[in-house]
Amino acid sequence: MTLRSDLAFISDWVKPHSHVLDLGCGNGKLLAHLQQTRQVMGYGLEIDEELIATCINAGINVIHTDLNEGLGNFIDNDFDYVIMTQALQVINKPDVLLREMLRVGQEGIVTFPNFGHYKCRIPLLFEGRMPVSATLPKQWYNTENIHLCTLHDFENLCEELGIQVLQRAVVDHSTLRPTLMTKILPNLFGETAIYRIKLK
Amino acid sequence: MPEVIPPDSVGVVTPQILDFNTPLKLDCGRMLNTYSLVYETYGELNADHSNAVLICHALSGDHHAAGYHSMDDKKPGWWDAYIGPNKPIDTNKFFVVSLNNLGGCKGSTGPISINPETQGIYGADFPIVTVNDWVKSQVCLGDTLGIKKWAAIIGGSLGGMQALQWAIDFPDKLSHCIMIASAPKLSAQNIAFNEVARQCILTDPEFHEGRYHDHNTKPRKGVMLARMLGHITYLSDNAMRDKFGRELREGKLNFGFDVDFQIESYLRYQGQSFVDRFDANTYLLMTKALDYFDPASKYEHDLSKTLENVTAKFLLVSFTTDWRFSPERSQEIVEALLKNKKSVSYADIEADEGHDAFLLPIPQYYKIFTNYMQQVARDIPEQQGEPA
């Protein structure tokens, strides 16, 4: 199974036999992969009925959930990892959800499109237009991405919320892995940011 | 009447009857020394008897879940949309068993059966049965059919409650538990509706304290009113608006108390046709079974504790406009299962049809149910040789 580059990273970070919650699990590929390769036990949360059907087909446990309503169904520290890939930016209150993630999980793993990437900066700087790219394909008025941020923004928020960054990876979609440029100037050359976090 | 049997139908089916002579001790303290259960089966049982699926019916349902009893039948069984070749409960893969519960009026021992002790009709003497009693009798049915473990036990509404009771009391006897539009117990509002329905029947002058058979009559008005009330709660406000609006039956107001609006005509029709096919004492019993269902009461009213030992994998489905068994009620069960780290999937289907949605072929519900049943099929051990 080919996994999106950010998902391949996550899969490396997750310890075998752990208990995992995947927020906005989409088609269930990540969780299915973790079940097969890491023998995790877990649940995916998804809002879209079509995707719920796909998840069931993928053989994962999926719970119909609107993440904007929080994680009230879950008790404190119930999971080893709470994962959220490419969903932070569509949430009404990302700060509240980050705190919720680390209430129910020991650790959090978060991925999001980096708005500090040079391809986002160029249209803004030279054309004065909102960026439209492969990672952010929609127009400003019809995008679900209502809370975009950069690596710096995210790390500042973590600081404010008392969250410690345990691990960070930044990938570039043309190479699907970290490059020299993403290592030197991650906020400029990283298209997708992947963080492993926990409460301080 | 079907001119030809559709290719995705189980076709013409014949109910079967099993007689049980081992006394069944009921929750009310009384014993049923002998009883019969009527049931239908669809599909073939495989060699190691591991592909059996049990269908539990709701308040007014029965064993006739799929197919036709004859070519003269106007309608197929109550869940024909979901049971048949290549349907979600695929009879090419599963051996489906659907029974009429004890206390029913469609062939299993109930108020219209003969009481062997008096040789008269049970009528009001038939004991009040509970979901727990039903499940115990269903275990006996499974044992007799040679099914040690059900691949899945499936039910909607009151049927879902039976599936849940199975999962709690007989964890080793089912692999999957599928509850649709159900609840861990009734709310005060649910009980209130049931009480009004019962009062309709109990206060009908033709009820004769349940001995209406002796008087060669039936509490027609009471049963009709009870069913009319029920129907209002099974539909959503939206569904009623879409289906009937304020449409007038004769295009004008009649300034009388007869039918003006289409909805009145619909409810009267539903009520009247129910009288002919359902027994008043059975209706009373079924509503009591619903009211009494509360498996957590044996576990300090703690639902997560109640579900601590379940081993079945769960699928729960609710419907957004169902206000009789609202999505929150299904979510209570989901939450309790999550606390216990049990295998569970849940979908709250966007549907306008209210509680009735569980019977209808709604595309997303159909797809989720289909995909889940394919998982159930994948869990069945591979068979050596031909089906039994």
Image: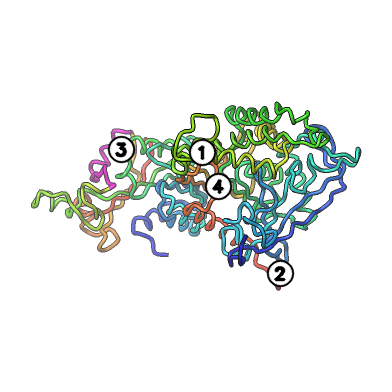
Q: Chain of mark 4?
A: B
Query: Magenta part of the protein: which range?
Result: A144-161
Q: Are marks 4 and 3 in contact (CB under 8 Å)?
A: no
Q: Which mark is residue B387?
A: 2
Q: What whole-number distance in Å separates the C-alpha atoms at marks 2 and 4?
A: 32 Å
| Amino acid type, label 4 | Phe
Q: What whole-number distance in Å separates the C-alpha atoms at marks 3 and 2?
A: 60 Å
Residue on which the image places disc 4: B358
Which one is earlier in the sequence, the residue at label 4 or at label 1? 1
| Mark 1 or 3: the one toward you | 1
Q: Are marks 4 and 1 in contact (CB under 8 Å)?
A: no
Q: What whole-number distance in Å separates the C-alpha atoms at marks 4 and 1?
A: 22 Å
Rendered image quadrant of residue B382 = bottom right
Q: Are marks 4 and 1 on the same chain?
A: yes
Q: Are marks 3 and 2 in contact (CB under 8 Å)?
A: no
Residue on which the image places disc 1: B263
**Mark 2 surroundings within 10 Å by alpha-carbon count, few (fewer than 14), some (14 through 19), many (20 or more):** few
Question: Which type of secondary structure does the marked residue at label 1 adopt?
Answer: helix
Question: Which type of secondary structure does the marked residue at label 2 adopt?
Answer: loop
**In which quadrant of the rendered image does the N terminus of chain A lie?**
bottom left
| Vertical comparison of B290 with A5: above or below | above
Q: Toward the viewer: B296 or A197?
A: B296
Q: Is residue A149 magenta?
A: yes
Q: What whole-number distance in Å separates the C-alpha atoms at marks 1 and 3?
A: 58 Å
Question: Which type of secondary structure does the marked residue at label 4 adopt?
Answer: helix
Q: Chain of mark 3?
A: A
| Amino acid type, label 2 | Pro
| Amino acid type, label 1 | Ile
Q: Give how far across and how far down residue A9 sits, in percent.
A: 37, 55
Q: Is residue B32 magenta?
A: no
Which one is earlier in the sequence, the residue at label 2 or at label 4? 4
